[in-house]
């Protein structure tokens, strides 16, 4: 549990307080951006936060709380939950949910394979 809390704190700090030179280190597939915006416009900003967390973690799954995302994008916790659930249903992300807010997010970078 201690590692989970430490990883979550590191991921949340990276997302909640990006610096002026913060950037998403890898290209985001256009299909991913289009799919996020197609769910609802608020989904796009949550998707960008997830990509940022993904690149900062530099691994397939990374911890993030809904609260950290809500705080980072200025949306309500409930809106972020709805958006994340919609993204999961659309196949954009997988979520390993754990009680206490320590969820692990895994991004599906290859949406074209699902569409095909």
Image: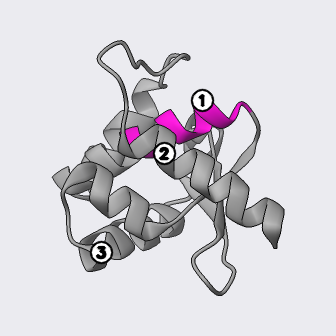
Element type at marker 2? Answer: helix
Q: Which residue is mark 1?
A: 55
The numbered mark at residue 25 is none
Counting labels gives 3
Between label 3 and label 2, give the one nearer the viewer: 2
Q: Which residue is mark 3?
A: 77
Q: Looking at the image, tell me whether mark 3 or mark 1 is earlier in sequence order.
A: 1
Please provide the residue range marked out in magenta: 48-58
Q: Answer with mark 3 or mark 2, whichever residue precedes in sequence.
A: 2
- Image coords of residue 38 (percent x, y): 26, 50
Quarter of the figure with residue 15: top left
Image quarter (top left, top right, bottom left or bottom right) of the N terminus:
bottom right
- Residue 111 is left or right of residue 29, and the answer is right
Is 8 placed above or below 83 here? Answer: above
Q: Identify the element where label 3 is drawn.
A: helix
Which sits in the foreground, 114 or 5?
5
Extreme residue in the top direction: 21
Q: List x then y, in percent, for residue 82.
A: 33, 75
Secondary structure mainly formed by the magenta segment: helix
Residue 107, image x, y percentages: 62, 46
Q: Residue furthest bottom?
A: 99
Q: Which residue is the site of mark 2?
A: 13
Residue 101 located within the stretch drawn in magenta: no
């Amino acid at each position: 549990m201690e590692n989970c809390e430490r990883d979550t704190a590191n991921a949340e700090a990276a997302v909640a307080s990006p610096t002026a030179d913060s950037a998403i280190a890898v290209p985001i597939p256009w299909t991913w951006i289009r799919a996020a915006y197609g769910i609802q416009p608020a989904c796009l900003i949550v998707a960008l936060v997830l990509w940022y967390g993904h690149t900062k973690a530099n691994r397939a799954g990374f911890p993030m709380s809904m609260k950290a995302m809500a705080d980072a994008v200025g949306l309500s916790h409930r809106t972020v939950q709805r958006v994340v659930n919609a993204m999961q249903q659309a196949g954009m992300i997988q979520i390993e949910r754990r009680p206490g807010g320590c969820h692990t997010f895994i991004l599906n970078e290859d949406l074209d394979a699902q569409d095909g």
